Amino acid sequence: SKRYSKALILVSKDNEEIKEINKNFLLLMKLIGKIPKFKNLINSPLLKIPNKIEILNKIFKKLDLSKKFIGFIFTLTKHGKLPMVDKVFDQFQETISLKNNITKVDITTSIPIDESLEKKIKNKLQEQLSSKVELNKIVNPEIIGGIILKIKSIMIDHSIRSKLLNFKI
């Protein structure tokens, strides 16, 4: 998935084209998530590649996708890699984030955080990480209180639940 993601970025002329491809990719992933038959089409090993391409071509004409993106999806299809389009998408998003110096951070709290606290956390993380930060807010009442931060493969767990689990009598 990394190889295909990098190839897609390399064939793009500029940031505008990358934005257009990203918009196309987001639309495709949204359709795959919403329409089970479309997901089945993509994942089906029984459907022959020329038939898949024909069906996809009919769908793509109605969606007004860029020619480069359509060509990319057809390349995935021809190489039998279309079922891993979600992994390629995730890798593409990660590559764009790296290129734009954006660090994605998962922040888990027991209740939704207000805007002022979110802003403070984001500013502090940007200062510490020396990059732009994109927060993915997750609400999980099971942590009871506190906060859990996940930055790439590092997890900082300051939840009450973990403190209680670690508490020894």
Image (spheres, helix red, strand yellow):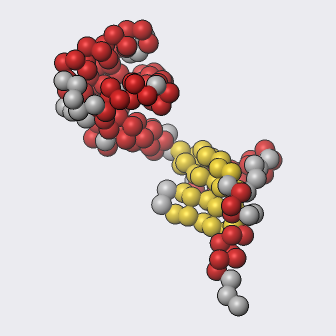
**Residue 107: which quarter of the image?**
bottom right
Q: Is residue 19 left or right of residue 167?
A: left
Instruction: Give the number of marks.
Output: 0
Task: Tell me what residue is drawn at x 28 percent, y 31 percent.
Answer: 44
Task: Tell me what residue is drawn at x 32 percent, y 43 percent.
Answer: 2
Q: In this view of the protein, which residue sits in the foreground, 9 or 28? A: 28
Q: Determine whether 100 is above or below 157 in the image.
A: above
Q: In this view of the protein, which residue sits in the foreground, 14 or 143? A: 143
Q: Is residue 123 left or right of residue 14?
A: right
Q: Determine whether 129 is above or below 158 in the image.
A: above
**Residue 78: which quarter of the image?**
top left
Task: Tell me what residue is drawn at x 48 percent, y 60 percent.
Answer: 153
Q: Quadrant of the C terminus?
A: bottom right
Q: Position of residue 37 (x, y in %)?
A: 40, 24
Q: Is residue 137 left or right of residue 99?
A: right
Q: Quadrant of the N terminus?
A: top left
**Residue 109: which quarter of the image?**
bottom right
